Image: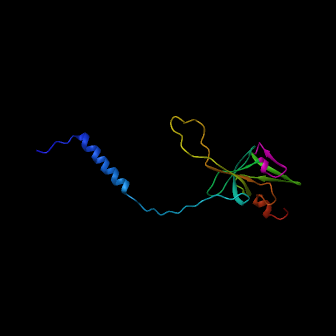
Amino acid sequence: MAPALSTSMVWPQILLATLSRLAADAHTVEFRMVVFRPFKGEVMLGRIRSSTPAGINLRTDFFDDIFVPYEELPQGAEYNHSEQLWIWNFDEDRLFYDNHEMVRFQVVDEEWHDQTPAGPSQADNAPAKTPYKIKGSMAREGLGACIWWDEAGL
């Protein structure tokens, strides 16, 4: 007569056999990766996403976390609270940083934030920081709204 096997002995053996079979599986994966990391000093094109008294938020077609602080705007720039946009007073002209306007900016700095998940005992209610953020400047000649520099006279 065959010895009876208890279920407490069978399930661990099946589980071990399944795990060992899964660990032995190997798969070749082919993929393409695009890396975006502009160098400091690089001049790029972006669109104005929004403006605040702290500065201007920009975006590209594939990246949204670009910020130009008010200190990096040209001399004479002022924030208009009623229109919620920045205006550059250049000689006798008032040049507007309109939302969705194409602009040239220079990369001056970058910020990296670790995205390691917090465990249940470490969880806090602080909002998550973006993993990568670019700080830009529009203070140099030729930077700012593209339409300003493409038109004759400036």
Position of 139 with respect to 13 (left or right) is right
Question: How many numbered badges does the structure rendering display?
Answer: 0
Residue placed farthest to the left in the image? 1
Q: Is residue 86 magenta?
A: no
Instruction: Place residue 45 in its image quadrant.
Output: bottom right
Q: Which residues are magenta?
A: 70-83
Where does the image place residue 27, in percent across and percent down from the top left? Answer: 41, 60
Residue 37: where, in percent of width, then height? 64, 58
Q: Quadrant of the N terminus?
A: top left
Expressed as whole percent of the image width and height from the top left, the position of residue 137 reads 76, 53
Q: Is residue 74 magenta?
A: yes
Decide if residue 134 is on the left or right side of residue 95: left
Question: Residue 28 location in percent, x, y?
Answer: 43, 62
Residue displayed at 78% across by 64% down = 150
Question: As displayed, is residue 121 above or below residue 93?
Answer: above
Q: By what rule are the colours in the image chosen?
A: rainbow
Q: Is residue 132 above or below residue 43?
A: above
Which residue is at a point 20% across and 42% down the rendered structure image? 5
In which quadrant will I find the C terminus?
A: bottom right
Residue 9 versus residue 132: which sits nearer the camera? 9
Depth check, front residue: 119 or 20: 20
In this view of the protein, which residue sits in the foreground, 54 or 145? 54
Residue under the point 31% across and 47% down:
15
Please state which of residues 18 and 139 is positioned toward the viewer in this rendering: 18
Q: Relative to 80, is 60 on the left or the right?
A: left
